[in-house]
Image (cartoon, rainbow, N blue to C red):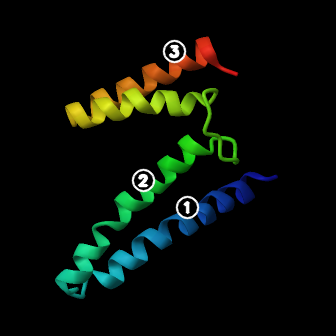
């Protein structure tokens, strides 16, 4: 591959990545939406994040795995408790990372 084709590829990938993010904001920022729609849309991001998180915990290898050998479930328990108790992103992430590191190094299957 020549340097020109690599630069063209990088520019193309950048354009394809940025357009879906910029176009909706540029087009829809001119409109005022009803409060009911705004309220409904405010739940979309947390719902998607929750679904992705649940999928990563319950089916880490693509199949539903709810048993004692699933270290993701075990790491989720203290992480969730710290998240509820502290409401701190820092302590929640720290707990999750340390739990996974401990479980992965000592109990990984």
Q: Earlier in the sequence, mark 3 or mark 2?
A: 2
Q: Residue visible at 44% across and 25% down?
A: 97
Which numbered marker is on residue 102? Answer: 3
**Quadrant in the picture for residue 15:** bottom right
Residue 97 shown left or right of residue 82 in the figure: right
Q: Residue visible at 40% across and 72% down?
A: 22
Would you place residue 99 above or below residue 59 in this image? Answer: above
Instruction: Report the front residue among 93 and 74.
Output: 74
- Give the residue number, with chain letter if any, for mark 1: 14
Instruction: Report the front residue among 93 and 103.
Output: 103
CA separation, marks 1 and 2? 28 Å
Q: Residue visible at 28% across and 75% down?
A: 40
Between label 1 and label 2, give the one nearer the viewer: 2
Q: Tags 1 and 3 in contact by the CB under 8 Å rule?
A: no
Measured as percent of width and height from the top left, residue 6 is found at: 71, 54
Element under disc 3: helix
Q: Residue visible at 64% across and 27% down?
A: 69
Element under disc 2: helix
Instruction: Report the front residue among 37 and 103.
Output: 103
Which numbered marker is on residue 50? Answer: 2
Between label 1 and label 3, give the one nearer the viewer: 3
Q: Earlier in the sequence, mark 1 or mark 2?
A: 1
Measured as percent of width and height from the top left, residue 96 is found at: 42, 28
Which numbered marker is on residue 36? Answer: none
CA separation, marks 1 and 3? 38 Å
**Quadrant in the picture for residue 8:** bottom right
What is the quadrant of the C terminus in the image?
Answer: top right
């Amino acid at each position: 591959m020549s340097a020109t084709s690599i630069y063209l590829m990088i520019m193309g990938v950048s354009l394809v990545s940025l357009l879906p993010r910029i176009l909706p904001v540029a087009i829809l920022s001119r409109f005022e939406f009803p409060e009911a729609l705004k309220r409904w849309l405010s739940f979309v991001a947390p719902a998607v994040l929750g679904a992705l998180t649940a999928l990563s915990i319950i089916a880490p290898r693509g199949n539903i795995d709810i048993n004692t050998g699933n270290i993701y479930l075990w790491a989720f328990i203290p992480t969730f408790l710290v998240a509820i108790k502290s409401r701190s992103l820092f302590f929640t992430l720290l707990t999750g990372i340390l739990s996974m590191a401990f479980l992965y190094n000592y109990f990984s299957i």
